[in-house]
């Protein structure tokens, strides 16, 4: 196996140096999603991906990640799409609808395009849980999303 997410180490193959990554970032809960983005970019760079091989696109919220991912995955030069967002549970069922729609939408994009589309969306009960997963005590899930994209390209 080329690597493990637990150690953060992923074997870099020479073919990875030619791969292009799109990172689609939700602007909602921006301080969290910016931390996720930083983690994703750092992980890609640490594994030999050049900054010019990374394309960032912003969308207003997590619900819009599916369409953003589709538009990026449909581009021939894009090899993998990393989607970053943060949905924090409130007092209404809105959280459940958004989370389910995003998970389903990103899965559909991946299956439709045959490209890795990574779900790097935090679905937390409160803001502290989001901070803990965006560079806090539980690491950076943006980094994990980038490592998942690398591993799927090596699959």
Image (spheres, helix red, strand yellow):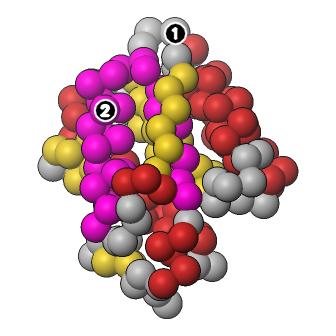
The quarter holding residue 46 reads bottom left
Q: Which residues are magenta?
A: 20-46
Residue 92 place in picture, x, y as percent: 52, 9
Residue 60 place in picture, x, y as percent: 52, 17
Please indicate, yes or no, whether residue 49 appears anywhere in the rendered image.
yes
- As helix, strand or loop, the secondary structure at mark 2 comes to helix
The C terminus, quarter of image = bottom right
Q: Is residue 44 left or right of residue 85?
A: left
Q: Is residue 131 above or below residue 27?
A: below
Q: Is residue 136 above or below residue 123?
A: below
114 magenta-colored:
no
Q: Residue furthest top?
A: 91
Residue placed under numbered mark 1 in the picture: 92
Residue ID at (43%, 53%): 52
Residue placed under numbered mark 2 in the picture: 34
Residue ID at (51%, 75%): 16
The quarter holding residue 28 reads top left
Characterize the magenta stretch by its predominant secondary structure. helix
């Amino acid at each position: 196996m080329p690597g493990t997410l637990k150690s953060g180490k992923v074997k870099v193959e020479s073919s990875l140096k030619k791969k292009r990554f799109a990172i689609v970032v939700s602007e909602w809960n921006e301080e969290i999603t910016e931390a996720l983005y930083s983690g994703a970019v750092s992980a890609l760079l640490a594994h030999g991906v050049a900054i010019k091989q990374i394309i960032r696109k912003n969308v207003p919220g997590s619900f819009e990640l599916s369409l953003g991912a589709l538009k990026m995955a449909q581009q021939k030069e894009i090899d993998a799409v990393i989607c970053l967002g943060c949905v924090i549970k409130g007092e209404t069922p809105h959280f459940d609808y958004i989370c389910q729609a995003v998970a389903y939408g990103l899965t559909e994009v991946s299956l439709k395009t045959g490209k890795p589309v990574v779900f790097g969306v935090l679905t937390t009960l409160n803001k502290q849980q989001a901070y803990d997963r965006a560079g806090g005590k539980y690491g950076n899930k943006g980094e994990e999303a980038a490592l998942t994209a690398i591993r799927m390209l090596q699959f």
